[in-house]
Amino acid sequence: MLAKLSMHLSIRRCAVTGVAGLALLGAGLPGAVRSAADDPTPGLTRFYDQKVKWSACEGMDMPEDLQCGKVTVPLDYARPEKGTLDLAVARYRATGKSRGSVLLNFGGPGVPGVTQLAIGGKHFMGLTNGYDVVGFDPRGVGRSSPVSCGNDSTDALDATDGNAEVADPQAVLEKLRAAAAECAEHSGPVLRHMGTVNAARDLDVMRDALGDDKLNYLGFSYGSRLGAVYSARFPEKVGRVALDGVDTLTEPLSEQGMVSARGQQTALENFLTWCTEDIACPFGQDPREAREHVVQVVESLDEDPVPTDFGEAFSGQDFAGALGQGLYSRELWPSLQRAVAQLLEEGDTRGLEAFASGGVTLPPLRGKHRGLVDPEEVPLDNLPAALMAVNCADDPDRPAAAQVTKDLGRLRARYEQASPVFGRYRLTQVLLCYGRPKGTDFIRDEVKDVDSARMLLVGTRGDPATPYRWTVETAERLGSSAVVLDNRGEGHTGYGSSKCVHGKVDAFLLYGTLPPDGSSCGSDHDAE
């Protein structure tokens, strides 16, 4: 799924506000030991022989009962002798006898699982009745050799920002090429080995290092793509796998971006209907006028950005990105309303900037072994940089320069028609793959008719990022192993917002109890 972040301010500040909704998601993993001799790939035995050494997590605000460790994986699975990466892992231990682990991925791609487990661990404590609950930072993410596009990563943003010169698409292409080169320079060798296929192989090494014979897994949003790819790559190792907010496996990035723009526009309209019922709504009390007001604010801030405490300007694209983050969960709407009022009434951007999180810029990584970086050394732009790296590595479509030049004006018009608020920065996400190597065709061609244990797929009807039809389409593609749970609620994913979904996912992971295929959960808000 195309991630949820502003591709302007956030690309310099690592916006993780979509994560605020995703922080309500996840769970961990350990189990039965598999011999490294069972591994069919030459040179991987030493990776499958390791065991995680757990210790107290270091850093401010880390829960005392959270343990941290690392798992070492090959940089390049085709040449495992050529270097390694360390992946950060963390766990909450089972409260009684552990039957193994359940591994969590919080989405993005690019969301650091260790941080999210530390922040949102209380939502997964029910799973500790039988499992160690484990989060991890995938390769290139968080403390695990984080990728970056550098401090001055504005070339690609400028390509479609404001009044980009669609009449001169060659200039746009040059900016995109420059942006790709900057990302390669600042990320080091890990950038060439990003993508979900490699992350799935990492997941299998982690499974074994945790002592599990089979993978128990809960993946949210992009995490559903990772779970599906793992299931196709290692079908005999699938244990209990639940996927919430199911991603597409077939649509190209250009279509994914269009879907995301439309979904967020619908979510915005729902938010404005809710907001205008309150006398304190900064957009007034008329939903139609409120929609027009939002577009005017975006255009006005693009023409005349306001200064921020970070020394940068807050543009209309930053405003759109912050809105998008707040729309991923209905629970965020009140704080989003207050943040918008703070901007419109006082010119204060801090409330909207709270949907972003920061770090520092890291120099390029070199050497054969890349260990974990300190938390304070994670680059500011790691989330959007990782998002681009993974999405581009997963997408085999690379139109030639002539095709991009030909299509740019039409594409921008389609995106802005899909959403006058969110269309432009969604288009930027799509274009950022230009200048990068062609991605894999494995996901589109091979992840289908999976002969594995049955998996639970949760789709939410009002999901602004992963539409319900993607759940249905992915289930059909995976085949008879997929069981669909229809969540008739709002927001991105269901585990953190629906008691019904939460209960059914936990029942499956803990006891193997699957709901009937096509059964549904009603909206919690309808029951109030």
Image: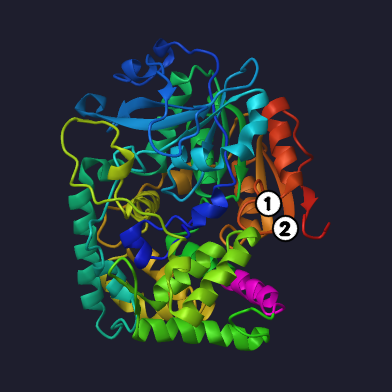
Q: Quadrant of the C terminus?
A: bottom right
Distance of label 1 from label 2 (alpha carbons): 8 Å
Picture layout, residue 54 above or below residue 75? above
Give the foreground label among 1 and 2.
Answer: 1
Residue at the spot 37% in from the left edge and 82% down from the top edge: 302
| Residue 451 rendering spot, x and y as whole percentages | 59, 31
Identify the residue under disc 2.
489
Identify the residue under disc 1.
497
Q: Are marks 1 and 2 in contact (CB under 8 Å)?
A: yes
Picture layout, residue 300 above or below residue 388? below
Label 1 is placed on what type of residue?
Ser
Please state which of residues 502 and 389 is positioned toward the viewer in this rendering.
Answer: 502
Residue 105 can be seen, yes or no: no
Classify residue 10 as left or right of residue 511: left
The quadrant holding residue 503 is top right
Quick one: SS at disc 1?
loop
State the extent of the magenta-drawn residues as a range. 265-278
Lower position in the chain sequence, tag 1 or tag 2: 2
Residue 233 can be seen, yes or no: yes
> How many other residues sit within 10 Å of disc 1, few (<14), some (14-19) or many (≥20)?
many
Residue at the spot 68% in from the left edge and 80% down from the top edge: 276
Of helix, strand and loop, which mostly describes the magenta segment? helix
The quadrant holding residue 432 is bottom left
Residue at the spot 52% in from the left edge and 27% down from the top edge: 65
Quick one: SS at disc 2?
strand
- Asked whether 404 falls inside the magenta stretch, the response is no
